[in-house]
Structure formats: C-alpha cells, structure tokens
Image (cartoon, rainbow, N blue to C red):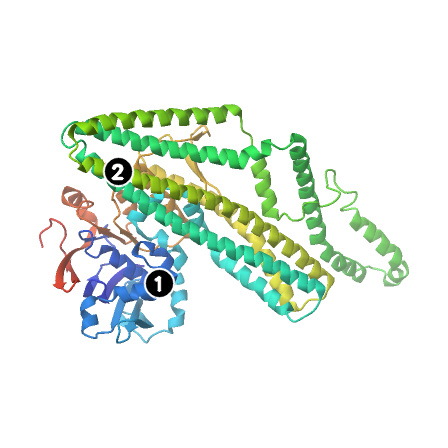
C-alpha cells in the first residue's frame, strides 16, 4: 500500500493544495517534503490523521493541541482564514492510496461550518478505485474495516505516523509507561478492557429491579469497583496532563540551557562557562536518577524488611500452597464435565446389556472410585484452604515476582546516599565556579538567563514532586481497584453458582473470565517477539556493540544485556536515547504485522551524523515501503541530500506568504527542495 495523492482545501495554511506521490520502485521509495519551521509540515501529518480517523485521532495529536474535549475547537481554528472571510464554510482533506497498480481507495473527510465559523457537521466519503477509475461510493460506516484491512487501525497508527520531536521528548523520559502504552495498543488491550467493562455493566443491568439481598450486595460491590476504576481513570488523566506539562518545562529548561551555552560569559571564558553549565546540567540529571532509585528502594522494598521474616516466609509458603491447590482444583473441575460422558459411553458400549443392568450400581461405584483416584489422595503441598481468595491469578504472579526482588542491603543504600552527597557537592562547586566567571563579563543577559533557569528548575522540581505524589496515589488506588474487582468477581461467582442464570448472562460471565485470562497471556506471548525485534533494530541503529540483547517485559520495563547475560547500563547521549526510542517504535511496528507507509515529521532533529545515517538507512532499507519525511533545512539538505538522491522518488518545497489580517498561505512546489534547482 502507498499513498498516491493528498489534497487539502481550506485546511489551516493550505488554501488548496494537491500533492502526488509515485509508487515506490527501482529503489526510490523516499518522499521529501521540506519546509522551514512554521511553514506547514506538521499540518500535513495532522491532515493524514484526521482524514483517516477523524475524532479518533485526537489522542495522537496532543502536540497540535487536539484532545477529545476540544475537537470542535481545533477544527474551528484549523479553517483557513481567507475562505472564512468569504463564507467558503467548509474544510476538506482527501487521501488516495493504492493497494496495487490498478486498484485502491479514495477517502475524503469534509467539515462544514455555520455562518459564525463554528464547526457544524462532518461528512465522510469512501470510493473504491478499480482499473484506475473511481467507482460508486462505499457506505461510510465501512471505513474502519477498510483501514484495518489496508492501512492500520487508529491505535496502531503512532507506530507508523509520528512526530520526531515527540520521539525525542519520549526518549528523555521514563520509557516504562509509553512502552507499556504502545504494547497495550499493539495487543488491543484497551478494546478488550472496554468490552469487559460493558459486559460487567450488562450483568448489573440484567439484575436491576430485583430485591434479592445477594443481588443488592453484588450491585453495591460493582458500584464500589466502578467508582474506584473511574477515580483511577481521572488520576491517570491528571498524570498525562502533568507529564505533558513536565515535557514543556523540560523543553523550556533545555532551551535556556542552550542559550547559556551559546552566550557563555559574554565573550570572556566562553568555553569554560559552557563546560561548567554542561557539567552542572549532567550532574543534576544524575542526581534526579539517584533520587528516583532511592524513592523506589525506600517505598517498594524497605517496608518488606520491617516485617518479621517469619511472617513473610509464612505468607510465601501459604501463597505457594494455594497456587498448587488452585491448579489442582482447576484440573479437577476441567475434567469433571467429561465424567458423565465417559460413564454414558461406557454403559452404552458394554458388550453384555443384561449383565450391565444387573451390575450397574457396582460398576458405577467402581468407576467413581477409579475416577476419584485421579485426584485423591491430594498431592503434597496443597493448602488446606484458600485464605487469600481476594487475589486474582495475575496478582499472585506479580506478588511472587515482587518477593524475588525485595532484597536490599545497607551497602546499596549507603552507596546511593554517598553518590547523592558527592553529586550535590560537585553541583555546588560547579555553581561557585560559574558564578565567579559570570561576574567577570556579564552584561546582565547571562544573569537574566540564569535566573530564568533557576525559576524553571524550581517549577520543574515542584512539578516532579506532584507527579511523584500522584504516582503513589495511582499505585495505591490500582491495588484498591484490583481488590474491589476481585471481591466483586468472587461474590458474583457465588451468586451465579447458587441460582439459575439466563443464557446470555452465563455467556457474558464466560467472556469476562476469558478476557481476564487472555490479557496477561497476550503480554507474555508477545514480549519475547517484541524483544527480538527491538534488539535487532537497535543493533542496526547503534554504533555501540556492548549490547547483545534487549528485553522488554509485560510492564513496559526495558533492560540491556551483555553477551555474558549480565544486565548493563549505558550512559546514552541525547542522540542515542532517540535511537533507543526509535528502535522501540520500530519494533512495535514490525510486531504489528502491518506494511504501510512510514510518515515522520521532523525526523532527525538532534541526531549526529553517524546516528542520522544509520536511522535513514534502516527506514529506507525496505524498498517497497513508502517513506515520507517532513524535514526542515537543518535536517536533510546540501551534501546530505545528495547522498540520498538515488532513493528520492519525489520532493516538495513548502513556501509561505502572508496575505494580511493575520492570514498566511502555504504552497507546496513540486520537484523543488532546499538548495536544489527546479
């Protein structure tokens, strides 16, 4: 599949623009669209998302300020200024893609506005293309199925259509959450969880209107679980907001840091001040990492060491015995339905019917005894009773994993504290050195930037504290949600077992149970495949050879390992961090199984020459995949562009002009590019 045409009408700075792209062939699969920042590159990425997915694209366009609650506001701002003054009250994006030389589809999404410029309605049209000719339209409600068959579902789109600036920001953060989010999108976990929630609500609705005490109890338990779950969703949403704010503060801090590096000490000891500022920044980052390690150690591991060791050992032994009992009971219950079938089959095939009837009681007794001998006497090590029945199967596994990781030593705490003390001392000394140099040649600008840096860092520290508090609340509430859900499920199962249930209710119960069993298995099945793909791509992109494999677990945690099997830690530069993040995204894309165009906005922002060459070589290595890069002049231009000339299928250069009254116009000039003559 490749995109053959994009057409925009009244979309942001594009009054009307057509872009046509050829089929990737003869080694030419690269499309370059160049433009200075602010000239409309990101607008093209937004247009692709919105044309394919409409409002469903909201969560993937946060950089553009597009969220679920502001879809209409975003569309209002997106309407080109000039047509809005001339009552051309619509905006449209059209994408044509081909699945082979003669067939494909044309998708158009048109937004209508009322006389005051407010978003009013949305119109979607889908046309098949057969033998190069547009056919009769398909029903618009078939679009999602069409995208899943030939393009990609919306929850997987960020693996193929993404903003390089966002990857750079993600690369600087704790990767755990966004890796896990990517894995959940890959496995369709969000869809399964939504289905489960709807089924549970269906069960409650089916029982409403009755006065049974058992049913009332179940409804109250579900309300408790549902309230906890909603509160957890609100906290997670708040966390996303704070994370976005944190990224903004970090970007602001980095910009100030760069300006400090540029001006140095006003022309005096520039290199010395630049080095000091850089060293301060690096040590503050290390200090932040150590603080997080200390917080994790003290909050996650230390509490276990305050408990009597006998209590912990007894708990582990009890949980192990309960796990064996649950497995034994599951095997027993799984075979129980087959017992009656076996008995019926035995007597129906008994060679002496008359004898069979006379001896049937004795034969049944013998068969029952033989059947029971499969399970009795019970195996050694089984718990006498299930005490911790509030724990789900997955929670038991996590608890067992946690027990194996709680060991800490006083030396590890001392080592972290000593490192923290040394870093604080170095930061203090570097600050004094910088202040002495600043005082020699500062005309006021440097001090102003330093004050801004101090204020920004203070705001960032306060925000980090808020995020830390919120993380702890989320962790606590997550446990509460698991507990209340386990209680609800346990009582609900008792109700189902004690009273006849309707067929649909039974089916809903089975599907819910299936989802609960499926979710952890999905992660365990796919994490190995993801780890293999990420390792392979990382080795292609990185020039460091210490890493033999990368492991990604179901919690989104990633670890690097040497050939000897030891876990290793590498000090990664900003470019190497981006390489790692790119390898994760590419690994997820590879695991998804979709083969569609790769579209990247601002693809090579901070990469050095070596990493830049490697990542482009990887993106272009699949000659059949269309690669569309939205680049500014500092990324792909000049001699670097010449090295890619034999891969380039098409170029466009974005030009921008002001029309007056705050309205601008972008025009894409075909077959032109930075420094390349027409």
Image coordinates for residue 28, horizontal then vertical, percent: 22, 51
Question: Which image quarter: residue 489?
Answer: bottom right
Residue at image coords 78%, 58% = 343
Outermost residue toward the right in this view: 358
Dividing the image into 4 quarters, which one contains the N terminus?
bottom left
Question: On the picture, is 228 further left or further right than 96?
Answer: right
Is 656 drawn above or below residue 537 in the view shown? Answer: below
Q: In which quarter of the image is the C terminus?
A: bottom left
For residue 559, the mark is none
Residue 285 percent across, percent down from the top left:
35, 34
Q: In this view, does 297 lie above or below 595?
A: above
Task: Tell me if I can see residue 670 in this picture.
Answer: no
**Residue at the spot of label 2:** 451
The residue positioned 42% from the left and 49% from the top of the image is: 591
How many other residues sit within 10 Å of disc 2, few (<14), some (14-19) or many (≥20)?
Answer: few
Residue 68 coordinates in the image, percent (x, y): 38, 62
Q: In which quarter of the image is residue 113?
A: bottom left
CA distance for labels 1 and 2? 35 Å
Q: Nearer the viewer, residue 604 or 538?
A: 604
* Residue contact at pointers 1 and 2, CB within 8 angstroms: no
Dividing the picture into quadrants, the one containing residue 508 is bottom right
Residue in the picture at 21% in, 49% down: 647
Q: Nearer the viewer, residue 245 or 654?
A: 245
Determine whether 360 is above or below 410 in the image: below
User: Residue at label 1?
Assistant: 70
Residue 46 coordinates in the image, percent (x, y) = 29, 59
How packed is label 1: few (under 14 Cα within 10 Å), some, or many (20 or more)? few
Is residue 318 in view? yes
């Amino acid at each position: 599949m490749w995109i053959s045409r994009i057409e925009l009408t009244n979309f942001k700075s594009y009054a009307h623009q057509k872009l046509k792209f050829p089929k990737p062939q003869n080694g030419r699969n690269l499309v370059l669209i160049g433009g200075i920042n602010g000239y409309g590159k990101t607008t093209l990425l937004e247009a692709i998302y919105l044309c394919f997915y409409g409002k469903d694209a909201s969560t993937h366009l946060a950089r553009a300020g597009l969220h679920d609650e502001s879809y209409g506001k975003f569309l209002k701002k997106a309407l080109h200024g000039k047509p809005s003054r001339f009552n051309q009250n619509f905006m449209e994006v059209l994408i044509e893609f081909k699945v082979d030389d003669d067939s494909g589809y044309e998708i158009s999404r048109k937004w209508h506005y009322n006389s005051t410029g407010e978003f009013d309605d949305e119109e979607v049209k889908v046309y098949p293309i057969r033998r190069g000719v547009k056919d009769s339209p398909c029903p618009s409600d078939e679009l999602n199925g069409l995208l899943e068959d030939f393009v990609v579902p919306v929850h997987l789109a960020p693996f193929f259509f993404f903003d390089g600036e966002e990857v750079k920001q993600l690369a600087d953060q704790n990767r755990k959450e966004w890796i896990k989010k990517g894995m959940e999108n890959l496995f369709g976990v969000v869809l399964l969880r939504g289905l489960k929630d709807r089924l549970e609500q269906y069960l409650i609705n089916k029982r409403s209107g009755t006065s049974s005490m058992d049913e009332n109890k179940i409804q109250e338990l579900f309300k408790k679980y549902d309230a906890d779950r909603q509160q957890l969703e609100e906290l997670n949403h708040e966390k996303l907001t704070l994370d976005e704010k944190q990224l903004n503060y970090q970007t602001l801090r980095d910009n100030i840091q760069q300006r400090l590096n540029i001006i140095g000490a006003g022309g005096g000891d520039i290199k010395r001040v630049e080095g000091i500022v850089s060293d301060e920044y690096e040590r503050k980052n290390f200090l932040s990492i150590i603080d997080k390690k200390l917080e994790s150690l003290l909050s996650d591991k230390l509490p276990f060491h305050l408990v009597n060791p006998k209590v912990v050992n007894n708990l582990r032994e009890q949980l192990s015995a309960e796990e064996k009992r649950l497995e034994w009971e599951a095997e027993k219950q799984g075979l129980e339905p087959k017992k009656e079938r076996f008995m019926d089959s035995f007597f129906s095939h008994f060679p002496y019917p008359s004898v069979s009837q006379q001896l049937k009681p004795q034969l049944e007794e013998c068969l029952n005894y033989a059947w029971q001998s499969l399970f009795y006497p019970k195996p050694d090590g089984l718990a006498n009773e299930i005490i911790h029945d509030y724990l789900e199967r997955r929670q038991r596994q996590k608890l067992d994993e946690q027990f194996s990781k709680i060991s800490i030593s006083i030396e590890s705490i001392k080592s972290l504290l000593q490192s923290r003390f040394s870093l604080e001392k170095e930061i203090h000394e570097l600050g004094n050195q910088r202040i002495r140099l600043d005082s020699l040649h500062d005309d006021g600008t440097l001090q102003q930037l330093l004050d801004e840096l101090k204020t920004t860092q203070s705001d960032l520290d306060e925000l980090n504290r808020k995020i830390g508090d919120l993380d702890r609340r989320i962790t606590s509430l997550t446990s509460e949600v698991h507990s209340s859900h386990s209680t609800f499920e346990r009582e609900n199962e008792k109700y189902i077992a004690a009273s006849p249930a309707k067929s649909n209710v039974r089916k809903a119960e089975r599907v819910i149970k299936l989802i609960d069993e499926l979710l952890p298995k999905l992660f365990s099945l796919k994490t190995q495949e993801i780890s293999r793909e990420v390792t392979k791509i990382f080795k292609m992109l990185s020039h460091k050879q210490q890493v033999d494999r990368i492991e990604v677990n179901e919690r989104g945690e990633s670890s690097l390992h040497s050939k000897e099997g030891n876990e290793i830690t590498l000090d990664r530069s900003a470019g190497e961090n981006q390489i790692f993040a790119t390898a994760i995204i590419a690994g997820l894309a590879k695991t998804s199984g979709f083969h569609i165009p790769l579209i990247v906005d601002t693809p090579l922002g901070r990469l050095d020459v070596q990493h830049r060459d490697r990542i482009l070589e990887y993106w272009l290595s699949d000659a059949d995949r269309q690669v569309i890069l939205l680049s500014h002049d500092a990324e792909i231009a000049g001699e670097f562009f010449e090295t890619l000339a034999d891969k380039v299928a098409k170029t466009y250069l974005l030009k921008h002009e002001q029309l007056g009254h705050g309205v601008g116009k972008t025009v894409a000039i075909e077959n032109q590019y930075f420094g390349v003559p027409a």
